């Protein structure tokens, strides 16, 4: 899941934004690419908030389409996955590309693990409170009549609420639509997740906690997004209402636990440039992990604009081996 962001208008998919920050920039010592996608080739406005604090470190940033074969990725000191939001439809091609990029953030091993939400079963096995999830794989028999109340059906490889629907199993029409949707998606080769719909989303919303280099940066609230059975959407995502949030102590504690546990769950997760932990409250108002965003999440700088862009820039500079004094 991600937020829609207005694009930062540029003249080409590969555009250096140094002119915007010329007056405050240090001498350029490092070059970074923000990876985007064909449908949205330009840098997102929210990501552009990081340009000024990065320029103070002497870091210049280009927006480059990940699938553009003309890009020479070796000329960059790091490639940061940002708005590569078409990857779910081209997963194997995308994962092969991540393995070819010389310095990818986050690392390819983490991206491969995180791109399929089957990882939720690993979190549950590690005793991390996680939303109950039933998997249905292609070719498996399934019986949705065993589910009661409201449920969510979505593929384990998905983004932007594509192919995601909310179904009230007490409603005969909804139950029939749920069965038809599950049959369609598994026939197309998707592994499905069946999860209970937590009603707290309709009022309290979801909480996303952002971490840069393993340290908490800020949190945000995402409002209700699903209103009924899946209807095809236009574009790569559904827009998500979002605002700044001060997380509950229980939410912060669980997110901290998840970030600390990641190195034991997946290779390469010792110090991730970015991580977004999305939580939801159960009926007892206890937080559960809904998903972990380690691939190409919106980082919602807009919800904490005074501090979070610089916090991210500090983290990226550290990954690049630049000292803090360079930005003074």
Image: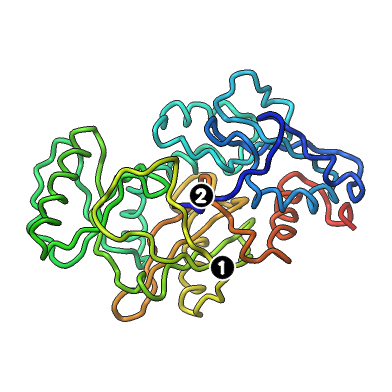
Disc 1 from disc 2: Cα separation: 15 Å
Give me the residue at 36% from left, 61% from top. Answer: 126
Q: Which residue is mark 1?
A: 219
Q: Which residue is mark 2?
A: 294
* Residue 76 in the image, given as x and y percentages of width and height: 73, 31
* Residue 68 in the image, given as x and y percentages of width and height: 59, 23
Give me the residue at 53% from left, 45% from top. Answer: 296
> Within 10 angstroms of label 2, few (less than 14), some, or many (20 or more) residues?
many
Quarter of the rendering occupied by the C terminus: bottom right
In this view, the mark in front (1 or 2): 1
In the rendered image, the vertical position of residue 293 relative to residue 15, given as above or below = below
Q: Is label 2 in a helix, a strand or a loop?
A: loop
Decide if residue 77 is on the left or right side of residue 123: right
Give me the residue at 66% from left, 23% from top. Answer: 71
* Residue 13 in the image, given as x and y percentages of width and height: 65, 30
Decide if residue 51 is on the left or right side of residue 71: right
* Residue sitting nearer the eye, 259 or 222: 222
Q: Is label 1 in a helix, a strand or a loop?
A: strand
- N-terminal of the two: label 1 or label 2? 1
> Within 10 angstroms of label 1, few (less than 14), some, or many (20 or more) residues?
many
Q: Which mark is residue 65?
A: none
- How is colour applied across the structure in the image? rainbow
Give me the residue at 15% from left, 56% from top. Answer: 174
Decide if residue 142 is on the left or right side of residue 24: left
Residues at marks 1 and 2 touching, judged by CB atoms closer than 8 Å = no
């Amino acid at each position: 899941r991600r937020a829609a962001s207005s694009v930062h208008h540029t003249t080409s998919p590969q555009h250096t934004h140094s002119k915007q920050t010329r007056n405050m920039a240090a001498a350029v010592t490092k070059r970074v690419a923000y990876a985007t996608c064909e449908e949205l080739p330009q840098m997102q406005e929210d990501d552009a908030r990081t340009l000024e604090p990065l320029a103070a470190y002497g870091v210049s940033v280009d927006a480059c389409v990940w699938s553009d074969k003309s890009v020479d990725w070796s000329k960059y000191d790091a490639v940061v996955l940002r708005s590569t939001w078409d990857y779910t439809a081209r997963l194997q091609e995308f994962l092969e590309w991540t393995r070819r990029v010389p310095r990818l953030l986050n690392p390819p091993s983490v991206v491969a693990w995180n791109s399929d939400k089957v990882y939720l079963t690993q979190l549950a096995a590690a005793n991390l409170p996680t939303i109950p999830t039933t998997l249905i794989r292609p070719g498996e028999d399934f019986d949705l009549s065993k589910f009661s109340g409201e449920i969510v059906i979505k593929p384990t490889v998905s983004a932007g609420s594509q192919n995601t629907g909310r179904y009230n199993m007490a409603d005969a029409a909804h139950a029939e639509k749920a069965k038809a949707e599950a049959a369609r998606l598994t026939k197309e080769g998707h592994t499905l997740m069946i999860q209970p719909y937590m009603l707290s989303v309709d009022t309290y919303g979801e909480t996303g906690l952002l971490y840069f280099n393993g340290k908490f940066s800020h949190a945000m609230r995402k409002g209700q997004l699903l209103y009924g059975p899946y209807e095809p959407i236009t574009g790569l995502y559904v827009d998500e209402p979002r605002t700044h949030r001060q997380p509950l102590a229980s939410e912060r504690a669980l997110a901290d636990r998840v970030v600390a546990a990641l190195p034991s769950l997946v290779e390469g997760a010792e110090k991730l440039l970015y991580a977004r932990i999305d939580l939801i409250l159960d009926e007892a108002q206890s937080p559960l992990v809904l998903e972990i965003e380690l691939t190409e999440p919106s980082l919602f700088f807009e919800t904490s604009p005074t501090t979070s862009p610089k916090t991210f820039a500090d983290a990226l500079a550290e990954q690049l081996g630049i000292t803090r004094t360079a930005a003074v």
